[in-house]
Image (cartoon, grey):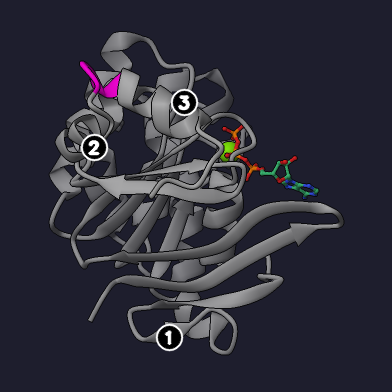
């Protein structure tokens, strides 16, 4: 059984076709990177798959359950670290984790999360006083408290310095193979370093799917960034 199978998944905002007939299959334990320029439709895909917005048409099956007909069952299996980090600024790091643990009824996990995300030293600091990198780490730790089988990471390393990004890569790498992840990013090297496969979207359409090496070969490019530019900007349908 696939972790995620989308069937003509489509979202229209008035005249704007944000996601058009997306057909995508992601295996269990896979880390799939979804790439595309601003406005390509990445966040809209993630919001539909995490049942935050409903598709205009089409469906997606997550570990056997449909987002259209069984969103509650889907929500029990997934979690999300959103593009806009969702930490409570005036709660401490530990309180943020405790709050989420209480909501999901999974207590005791917060100490484990503090350790595995290197947050123990700042456990009693208010979240708003943390650096951007630490806030991102907290956001992902919070998303993992519910022990999701599928995790969506929408630009998890946005605005982080090189060191903070590398630390987060390590944290994400530790999860590889254990849970299924979809990650969006504007950093090509991040997609190359972390993902099993990469999907490239442009104007709501999925233009190509493959490993970084396959996409480089397919476009006869020298680097993955060149391959991305070729695929993310092409407008005609390729044969
Ligand atoms: N709530 C909304 N109402 C109307 N239009 C929307 C809404 N959310 C997204 N859109 C439009 O849908 C399209 C896709 O947006 P989306 O946020 O999915 O892009 P993205 O690939 O995540 O971009 P970015 O890299 O900037 O995060 C854009 O044209 C955007 O303006
Ligand atoms: Mg986005």
User: What secondary structure is found at the residue carrying circle 2?
Assistant: helix
What residue do we see at 14% from left, 43% from top?
174
Badge 1 local density, few (<14 within 10 Å), some, or many (20+)?
some
| Residue occupied by mark 3 | 125
- Asked if the residues shown at circle 3 and circle 1 are in contact, with their CB atoms under 8 angstroms apart, the answer is no
| Residue occupied by mark 2 | 218
Name the residue nearer the viewer: 162 or 232: 232
* Label total for image: 3
Name the residue nearer the viewer: 55 or 168: 55
Say left or right for 54 vs 72. right
Which quadrant would the N terminus be assigned to in this image? Answer: bottom left
What residue do we see at 22% from left, 66% from top?
27
Q: Is residue 107 magenta?
A: no
Percent position of residue 16, x then y? 79, 50
User: What secondary structure is found at the residue carrying circle 3?
Assistant: loop
Say left or right for 77 vs 85. left
User: What secondary structure is found at the residue carrying circle 1?
Assistant: strand
Choose the circle earlier in sequence order: 2 or 3: 3
Percent position of residue 10, x then y? 63, 65
The residue at label 2 has a CB less than 8 Å from ligand 1: no
Badge 3 local density, few (<14 within 10 Å), some, or many (20+)?
some
Choose the circle earlier in sequence order: 3 or 1: 1
Tell me if residue 46 comes above or below residue 40 in the rendering: below
Give the label on residue 65, or none: 1
Q: What secondary structure is the magenta-colored segment mainly?
A: loop
Numbered range of the magenta stretch: 221-225
What residue do we see at 47% from left, 24% from top?
158
Which label lies toward us, 2 or 1? 2
Which label lies toward us, 3 or 1? 1
Distance in Å between CA atoms under marks 2 and 3: 49 Å
What residue do we see at 41% from left, 16% from top?
160
């Amino acid at each position: 059984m696939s972790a995620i199978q989308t069937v003509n998944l489509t979202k229209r905002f008035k005249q704007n076709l944000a996601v058009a007939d997306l057909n995508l299959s992601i295996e269990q334990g896979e880390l799939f990177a979804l790439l595309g320029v601003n406005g390509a439709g990445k966040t809209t895909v993630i919001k539909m798959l995490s049942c935050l917005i409903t598709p205009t048409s089409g469906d997606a099956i997550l570990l056997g359950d449909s987002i259209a007909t069984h969103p509650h069952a889907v929500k029990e299996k997934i979690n999300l670290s959103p593009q806009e980090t969702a930490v409570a600024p005036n709660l401490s790091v530990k309180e943020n984790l405790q709050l989420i643990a209480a909501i999901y009824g999974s207590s005791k996990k917060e100490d484990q999360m503090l350790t595995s995300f290197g947050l123990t030293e700042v456990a009693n600091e208010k979240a708003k006083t943390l650096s951007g990198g630490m806030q991102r780490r907290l956001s992902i730790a919070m998303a993992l408290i519910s022990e999701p089988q599928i995790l969506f990471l929408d630009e998890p390393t946005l605005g982080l310095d090189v060191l903070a990004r590398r630390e987060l890569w390590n944290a994400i790498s530790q999860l590889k193979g254990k849970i299924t992840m979809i990650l969006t990013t504007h950093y090509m090297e991040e997609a190359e370093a972390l993902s099993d496969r990469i999907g490239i979207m442009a104007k709501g359409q999925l233009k190509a799917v493959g490993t970084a090496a396959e996409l480089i070969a397919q476009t006869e490019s020298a680097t993955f960034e060149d391959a991305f530019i070729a695929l993310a900007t092409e407008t005609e349908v390729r044969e």
